[in-house]
Amino acid sequence: MDDVAQEIGPGSAHSDADQQPDLASTVRSQAASYVTKRKEDVAKAVSDVADAIRNSGAGFEGAPHVKAFFDSAAEGVEGLSADINRRTVSELYDEVEAAVRRRPAVAFAAAALTGFALFRFFKASEIRPIPRSRAVVPADVFPTPDL
């Protein structure tokens, strides 16, 4: 008896094989485009931080040492922004991975500090109830109906 299940129908297996590389390459190109756009957004945000630092230091005209500190910090952050723009995403990933491998304790401490800061930020942004002792509105403003 012939095994019909093993026969390949005309174009059935080949069409799936032809579509998968196209789908994979499409997804890969879209992911690369998304990551590149986010990299540009990060570089712009870092550049904005440098501008904010520079503007903050502008108020210290009477203290040249303090103004020089702010200008130096702004130049360093601008250099970081230019470095992010100049490098590819894979180069940035490799650089971060190498830094983590060189100093894992510092990377762990930075991750813990970032996690703690994010936790505090999100916890502070949630709505907290007002204690009854400090409530401006009396507690019986909304009477409950007797059922």
Image: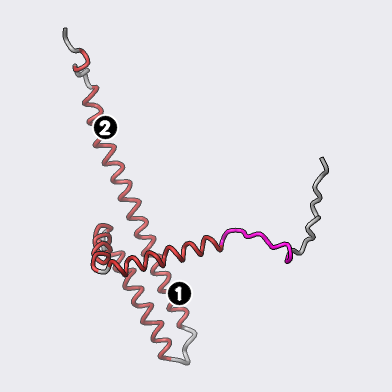
75 with respect to 116 (left or right): left
Q: Helix, strand, or loop for circle 1?
A: helix
Identify which residue is drawn at 73% across, 66% down.
Answer: 134
Estimate the x, y position of residue 68 in percent, counting from the top left: 39, 86
Estimate the x, y position of residue 41 in percent, counting from the top left: 39, 60
Against 136, is 5 above or below? above
Q: Answer with mark 1 or mark 2, whichever residue precedes in sequence.
A: 2
The image's colouring method is: secondary structure
Magenta span: chief secondary structure: loop
88 with respect to 144 (left or right): left
Quarter of the N terminus within the rendering: top left
Amino acid marked by disc 2: Gln
Magenta-drawn stretch contains 144 = no
- Which residue carries the number 1 mark? 52
Magenta-drawn stretch contains 127 = yes
Query: Residue 47's quadrant in the figure?
Result: bottom left
Estimate the x, y position of residue 75 in percent, counting from the top left: 35, 78
Against 100, is 24 above or below? above
Q: CA distance from mark 1 to mark 2?
A: 49 Å
Please state which of residues 124 and 104 is positioned toward the viewer in this rendering.
Answer: 104
Query: Residue 125's quadrant in the figure?
Result: bottom right
Query: Residue 115's quadrant in the figure?
Result: bottom left
Q: Residue furthest left?
A: 1
- Which residue carries the number 2 mark? 19
In magenta, the rendered stretch is 125-134
Label tally? 2
Q: Which disc, if any, is residue 102?
A: none
Identify which residue is drawn at 68% across, 62% down.
Answer: 130
Quarter of the C terminus within the rendering: top right
Identify which residue is drawn at 37% across, 79% down.
Answer: 73
